[in-house]
Image: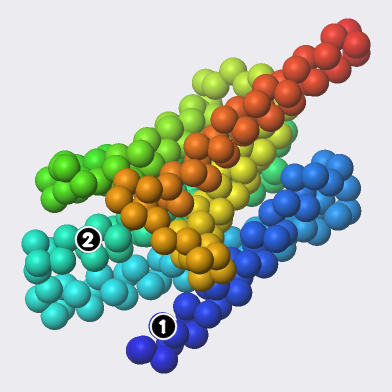
Amino acid sequence: MDYALEWNRWLHIVAGFIGLAAFWVPVFSRKGSSIHKTAGRVFRYSAIVVVAGAGLSVVVRITDAVLSGASISENIEGWSFLIFLGYIALFTGVILSHGIAVLKHKSDLSELNTPYRRLSAWSAIISSLFIVGWALYWQPDNAIVLYALSPIGILNGWSILQVISPSANHEPRKWLLEHLNAMLGCGIAFHTAFAVFGMGRILPLELTGIWQVLPWILPALIGIPATSIWMRKYRTQTAGALQQAG
């Protein structure tokens, strides 16, 4: 088992670096171009490997801890770390799947209203609420990261439910906005993982005290407003194109 987990760890690392590099190509390339689509596929497959590997590692380690009778109260930080990694893997998988699916059903997003899609959206919401409950119960005075990132799953899950609702009145090219939002969200998750696990191995940074949470929240603090600005830009472009066509 240890041998398999080690292979999984290295596969996770390699796929993470490939995905991190591939992410920026679609961002700056012309949308719909061959290089955009090719790099997008590379990022998608890398993200699938990363999410699956992270989920597997978390499940195995939590299972081992439970079977060995490990006490939560004796290792709160270790348990919180595993729970939080599982949360990140879950909501990243949810938005990745949504971002891919909207391309396949761009003509009618209500076709996404399937039991699987509804379940995945609710899983992101429920996992966020669980993270908040965990933090309140086990680490009420020392859970800044858990509190700061817990709304992401709720917001994304609720947004997906609104999009796939049969009664939804979608704005023009809603599929594109959903795709961009989902892929940029995955990019934020990738950069968070790199900032937390990779940056310290490359740069001699030793953050102490409250600054230790910076790698966890900085990608979101930058990425979420940037995503909002970019989405507004595409909405404006779409509105302008419709006015000219009219």
Color theme of the render: rainbow
**Mark closer to the observer (1, 2):** 2
Residue 33 vs residue 26, the one in the foreground = 26
Q: Residue 147, how many percent across, how many down?
A: 30, 40
Quarter of the image where the C terminus is located: top right
- Report the Cα–Cα distance between label 1 and label 2: 21 Å
Q: Amino acid at mark 2?
A: Glu
Which residue is pictured at 86% across the width and 55% down the height?
35
Question: What is the secondary structure assignment of the residue under circle 2?
Answer: helix
Residue 194 is marked as: none
Among the 4 quarters of the image, the one containing residue 158: top left
Which residue is pictured at 16% across the width and 73% down the height?
66
CB atoms at circles 1 and 2 under 8 Å apart?
Answer: no
Q: Residue 132, how many percent across, how many down?
A: 24, 41
Residue placed under numbered mark 1 in the picture: 5
Residue 77 is marked as: 2
Task: Note whether residue 75 is visible.
Answer: yes
**Image vertical order of residue 55 relative to residue 96, above or below:** below
Q: Residue 40, how many percent across, how many down?
A: 73, 55
Question: What is the secondary structure assignment of the residue under circle 1?
Answer: helix
Q: Residues within 10 Å of mark 1 (few under 14, many from 20)?
A: some
Which residue is pictured at 22% across the width and 78% down the height?
64
